[in-house]
Image (cartoon, rainbow, N blue to C red):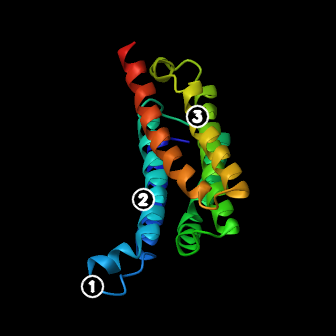
Amino acid sequence: MQTNRFETFIDAIIAIIITVLVLKIPQPATPTLAGVMELNYIYIAYLISFLILFNIWYANHNLFQAVDNISNRAVWIYGIMTFIISLLPYFTIWLANHIYSIPAETMFGLIFIATHILNTFATREIYASNPYNEELKAMNNDSHYLSLPMIVLIIGFILTYTVYVPGIYISCLISIIMWIVLGRIVRSDNNGN
């Protein structure tokens, strides 16, 4: 499949998910700073979900600049990932409204983990299906540093199930920031080589 059509499709889906996500944020009960601050968990959960979606879009944008075609297997992996991220608005608001709920924390964390794994698989499939693409070889996104956010998420699960229920919520925030920063570092190292 040609990447320009597929990239347009993924861009549209991510835009719709972000729109649904922002529409799920309730208005403050009172038009005061205190009213806004009462929604702090919702704003942070929205930020985490937005950064997940933005990072997927940005990474794919950079990746699709280097390839013209993607395999059917990659399309199916992206299809599954699209299904997973389409659940983000629902689980983001559930988590934001029940920050001390282990099921809400768990589902939000599982969506994050599934997204990270599927994005990694999709990227690797694109690399595997374009073995002679020199521009893609130069990008070399196969860095072990990109596994660090997953380790932070696992620590968050351990915290949630042992001592601190919002552990997954906090680990997701740390992980997405790490995912973005490490991605930039890997890209800048590859551009410098």
In the image, farthest residue toward the top: 193
Residue 90 left/right relative to 29 = right
**Image quadrant in which you'd find residue 86:** bottom right
Name the image quarter holding the C terminus.
top left
Residue under label 2 = 47
Question: Could you tell me residue 15's position as x and y percent?
Answer: 42, 61
Count neighbours of disc 3 (C-alpha within 10 A) and say few if under 14, some if 14 to 19, many if 20 or more: some
Q: Residue at x 57, y 71 (%)?
A: 90
Question: Amino acid under label 1?
Answer: Pro
Question: Could you tell me residue 12's position as x and y percent?
Answer: 44, 59
Q: Residue at x 42, y 36 (%)?
A: 181
Residue under label 1 = 31
For marks 1 and 2, give the CA distance: 21 Å
Mark 2, secondary structure of its residue: helix
For marks 3 and 1, give the CA distance: 41 Å
Question: Amino acid under label 2?
Answer: Leu
Q: Which mark is residue 87?
A: none
Residue under label 3 = 148
Q: Residue at x 56, y 24 (%)?
A: 143
* Total residue callouts: 3
In this picture, is 49 found above or below 129?
below
Mark 3, secondary structure of its residue: helix
Count neighbours of disc 2 (C-alpha within 10 A) and say few if under 14, some if 14 to 19, many if 20 or more: some
In this picture, is 72 found above or below 10?
above
Q: Earlier in the sequence, mark 3 or mark 2?
A: 2
Q: Earlier in the sequence, mark 3 or mark 1?
A: 1
Q: Earlier in the sequence, mark 1 or mark 2?
A: 1
Asked whether residue 125 appears in the rendered view, the answer is yes
